[in-house]
Amino acid sequence: MDNRELNAGHRQRLKDRFLKTGGDSLHDYELLELLLTYALPRRDIKPLAKELIKRFNGLSGVLDASSEELGRVKGLSPGSGILIKLNKALTEYYMTNEMSSRDVLSSPQTVLNFAKSKLAGQPNEVFLCIYLNTKNEVLKHSIINQGTVDKAAVYPRRIIKEALDCHAAGLILMHNHPSGHCQPSPEDKALTDSIISVAKTMDIRLLDHIIVGRLGHYSFAEKNLI
């Protein structure tokens, strides 16, 4: 049996395991390996998958990597890079769709998954706001501002203006910390208090402020700070 036959047998076993038990039965590098077999069908992908996991500090890091970063990886074809970015885009679309036409407060994990899909891996600080109706259903979401590695200017009145424009009754604010930690800074706390104060005058509620970092997340609502 030559290497081509061995590789084909290994790929088929990966597919069979995935179909039988889902992704939980596979290591992170095996999930990536299985994905890449559709772009590189005649190669042993395991070493490349392990290299990518190591280089980008995990599967999430691979999915969050830019096209330019992926393009610098030896052995990774342009088609493979597109497949990885397509997988990330599909995940983001799925997370967004999951929030549509439902009471998002009844499923806080859905909101957290959305926040992670949008913000995890961003090189600069990004603020995003979800606008909700009286049933806590999503009306829209938009990026409020994108800043530098450690700062993004956010103006509460701009958030409230967008809320009034779409007749929102509630808000969920979220942003990332590219440094990795997720504890709120004094500026984060001050911004949260300011938005609560301004929103209250318009009968709009700030329901949560979520901070996403590589080391986890922080929710003001979970900490009973809202």
Image (cartoon, rainbow, N blue to C red):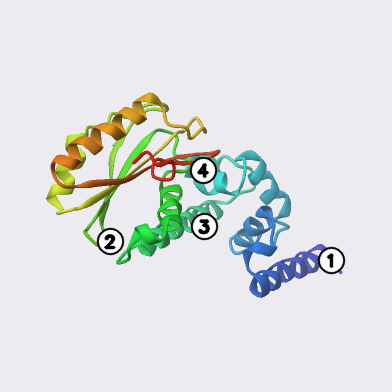
Q: Residues within 10 Å of mark 1 (few under 14, many from 20)?
A: few
Q: Which one is earlier in the sequence, the residue at label 1 or at label 3?
A: 1
Comparing labels 2 and 3, the label whose residue is closer to the camera: 2
Are dots 3 and 4 in contact, CB under 8 Å? no
Distance between the alpha carbons at the discs numbered 2 and 3: 32 Å
Q: Which one is earlier in the sequence, the residue at label 4 or at label 1?
A: 1
Q: Which one is earlier in the sequence, the residue at label 1 or at label 2?
A: 1
Query: Looking at the picture, which amino acid does disc 4 mark?
Result: Ala
Q: How many marks?
A: 4
Query: SS at mark 4?
Result: loop
Q: Residue at x 39, y 60 (%)?
A: 93
Left or right: 10 with respect to 132? right
Q: Quadrant of the C terminus?
A: top left
Say above or below: 171 vs 8.
above
Query: SS at mark 1?
Result: loop
Residue at the spot of label 4 = 65
The image's mark for residue 83 is 3
Q: Residue at x 44, y 39 (%)?
A: 122
Are dots 2 and 4 in contact, CB under 8 Å? no
Residue at the spot of label 2 = 137
Are dots 2 and 3 in contact, CB under 8 Å? no
Query: Looking at the picture, which amino acid does disc 2 mark?
Result: Glu
Residue at the spot of label 1 = 2
Q: Residues within 10 Å of mark 2 (few under 14, many from 20)?
A: many
Comparing labels 4 and 1, the label whose residue is closer to the camera: 4
Query: Looking at the picture, which amino acid does disc 1 mark?
Result: Asp
